[in-house]
Image (cartoon, rainbow, N blue to C red):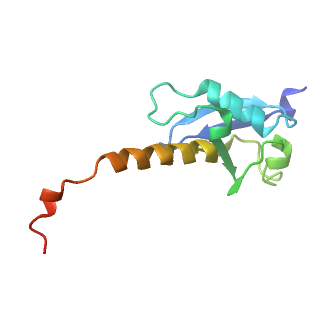
Amino acid sequence: MPEEDLVELKFRLYDGSDVGPFHYSPTATVSMLKERILSEWPKDKKIVPRTANDIKLINAGKILENGKTVAQCKAPFDDLPKSVITMHVVVQPSPTKARSGLVLLRRKLKRKKPHREAFAHVP
Protein backbone atom coordinates (compact mmCIF):
# COMPACT_ATOMS: atom_id res chain seq x y z
CA MET A 1 0.00 0.00 0.00
CA PRO A 2 1.44 3.42 -0.91
CA GLU A 3 2.49 5.42 2.12
CA GLU A 4 0.27 8.36 1.17
CA ASP A 5 -2.78 6.11 1.73
CA LEU A 6 -1.77 5.39 5.34
CA VAL A 7 -3.40 7.26 8.19
CA GLU A 8 -1.17 8.62 10.97
CA LEU A 9 -2.70 8.20 14.43
CA LYS A 10 -1.56 8.96 17.96
CA PHE A 11 -3.38 8.08 21.13
CA ARG A 12 -3.73 10.54 24.03
CA LEU A 13 -3.74 8.90 27.46
CA TYR A 14 -5.53 10.08 30.61
CA ASP A 15 -2.49 12.03 31.86
CA GLY A 16 -1.91 13.91 28.59
CA SER A 17 0.95 11.72 27.35
CA ASP A 18 0.78 10.06 23.95
CA VAL A 19 1.30 6.61 22.49
CA GLY A 20 2.45 6.87 18.90
CA PRO A 21 2.15 8.24 16.28
CA PHE A 22 1.83 5.13 14.13
CA HIS A 23 0.80 4.66 10.50
CA TYR A 24 -2.23 2.49 9.80
CA SER A 25 -4.01 1.25 6.74
CA PRO A 26 -7.54 2.67 6.37
CA THR A 27 -8.74 -0.96 6.57
CA ALA A 28 -7.25 -1.52 10.05
CA THR A 29 -9.96 -2.13 12.65
CA VAL A 30 -10.45 -0.43 16.00
CA SER A 31 -9.68 -3.80 17.63
CA MET A 32 -6.29 -3.78 15.95
CA LEU A 33 -5.62 -0.25 17.22
CA LYS A 34 -6.50 -1.30 20.77
CA GLU A 35 -4.14 -4.28 20.60
CA ARG A 36 -1.32 -1.99 19.47
CA ILE A 37 -2.05 0.49 22.25
CA LEU A 38 -2.01 -2.32 24.80
CA SER A 39 1.35 -3.60 23.52
CA GLU A 40 2.86 -0.08 23.53
CA TRP A 41 1.37 1.02 26.88
CA PRO A 42 4.00 2.88 28.95
CA LYS A 43 5.27 0.82 31.89
CA ASP A 44 5.35 3.76 34.32
CA LYS A 45 1.58 4.48 34.33
CA LYS A 46 -0.58 3.97 37.43
CA ILE A 47 -3.61 2.91 35.40
CA VAL A 48 -2.91 -0.03 33.09
CA PRO A 49 -5.48 -1.88 30.96
CA ARG A 50 -5.39 -5.65 31.40
CA THR A 51 -6.90 -6.45 28.01
CA ALA A 52 -7.71 -4.58 24.82
CA ASN A 53 -11.39 -4.73 25.87
CA ASP A 54 -10.55 -2.43 28.81
CA ILE A 55 -9.62 0.29 26.30
CA LYS A 56 -12.17 2.69 24.84
CA LEU A 57 -11.12 4.88 21.91
CA ILE A 58 -12.77 8.24 21.35
CA ASN A 59 -12.53 10.23 18.14
CA ALA A 60 -14.54 13.34 17.32
CA GLY A 61 -16.55 12.82 20.51
CA LYS A 62 -17.66 9.28 19.67
CA ILE A 63 -16.67 5.96 21.24
CA LEU A 64 -15.37 3.79 18.43
CA GLU A 65 -16.76 0.29 17.87
CA ASN A 66 -14.30 -2.62 17.60
CA GLY A 67 -15.49 -3.77 14.18
CA LYS A 68 -15.20 -0.38 12.50
CA THR A 69 -12.24 0.45 10.27
CA VAL A 70 -9.98 3.49 10.54
CA ALA A 71 -11.54 4.84 7.34
CA GLN A 72 -15.03 4.58 8.89
CA CYS A 73 -13.90 6.33 12.08
CA LYS A 74 -12.06 9.24 10.51
CA ALA A 75 -13.81 12.56 10.86
CA PRO A 76 -14.54 14.09 7.46
CA PHE A 77 -11.65 16.56 7.28
CA ASP A 78 -10.56 15.68 3.74
CA ASP A 79 -10.11 19.34 2.80
CA LEU A 80 -7.48 19.82 5.53
CA PRO A 81 -3.83 18.99 4.88
CA LYS A 82 -2.71 15.54 6.08
CA SER A 83 -1.80 15.56 9.73
CA VAL A 84 -1.69 13.27 12.72
CA ILE A 85 -5.14 12.34 14.05
CA THR A 86 -5.33 12.21 17.83
CA MET A 87 -7.68 9.71 19.44
CA HIS A 88 -8.35 9.73 23.15
CA VAL A 89 -7.90 6.60 25.24
CA VAL A 90 -10.07 5.76 28.24
CA VAL A 91 -9.28 2.75 30.40
CA GLN A 92 -12.49 1.18 31.63
CA PRO A 93 -12.67 -2.42 32.86
CA SER A 94 -15.35 -4.57 31.30
CA PRO A 95 -18.67 -4.55 33.23
CA THR A 96 -18.16 -8.05 34.66
CA LYS A 97 -14.74 -7.10 36.03
CA ALA A 98 -16.08 -3.84 37.41
CA ARG A 99 -18.95 -5.67 39.12
CA SER A 100 -16.62 -8.24 40.66
CA GLY A 101 -14.39 -5.40 41.90
CA LEU A 102 -17.42 -3.72 43.44
CA VAL A 103 -18.39 -6.96 45.20
CA LEU A 104 -14.87 -7.25 46.64
CA LEU A 105 -15.00 -3.63 47.81
CA ARG A 106 -18.35 -4.21 49.54
CA ARG A 107 -16.99 -7.29 51.30
CA LYS A 108 -13.97 -5.34 52.47
CA LEU A 109 -16.16 -2.52 53.79
CA LYS A 110 -18.44 -4.95 55.65
CA ARG A 111 -15.43 -6.33 57.50
CA LYS A 112 -14.46 -2.85 58.68
CA LYS A 113 -17.54 -2.09 60.78
CA PRO A 114 -17.08 0.69 63.34
CA HIS A 115 -16.94 -0.24 66.99
CA ARG A 116 -20.08 0.55 68.98
CA GLU A 117 -18.14 2.35 71.67
CA ALA A 118 -16.99 4.88 69.10
CA PHE A 119 -20.62 6.03 68.84
CA ALA A 120 -21.43 5.78 72.56
CA HIS A 121 -21.44 9.56 73.03
CA VAL A 122 -23.90 10.16 70.18
CA PRO A 123 -27.47 10.74 71.50
* x then y, percent, for residue 20: 63, 31
Left or right of residue 91: residue 9:
right
Left or right of residue 51: residue 13:
left
Asked whether residue 60 appears in the rendered view, the answer is no
* Relative height, residue 56 to residue 76 (above, below): above
The residue most toward the right is 1
The residue at the point 85 percent across, 37 percent down is 26
The residue lying toward the viewer, choosing from 109 and 57, is 109
Quadrant of the rendered structure where residue 60 is? bottom right
The residue at the point 76 percent across, 36 percent down is 31
* Relative height, residue 78 to residue 39 (above, below): below
* x then y, percent, for residue 101: 50, 43
Asked whether residue 50 appears in the rendered view, the answer is yes
The residue lying toward the viewer, choosing from 24 and 81, is 24
Question: Quarter of the image containing the C terminus?
Answer: bottom left
* x then y, percent, for residue 107: 41, 46
Question: Quarter of the image containing the N terminus?
Answer: top right
The residue most toward the left is 121
* x then y, percent, for residue 71: 85, 44
* Relative height, residue 49 to residue 115 (above, below): above
The residue at the point 87 percent across, 34 percent down is 5
Quadrant of the rendered structure where residue 56 is? top right
The residue at the point 82 percent across, 53 percent down is 79
Q: How many marks?
A: 0
The residue lying toward the viewer, choosing from 84 and 27, is 27
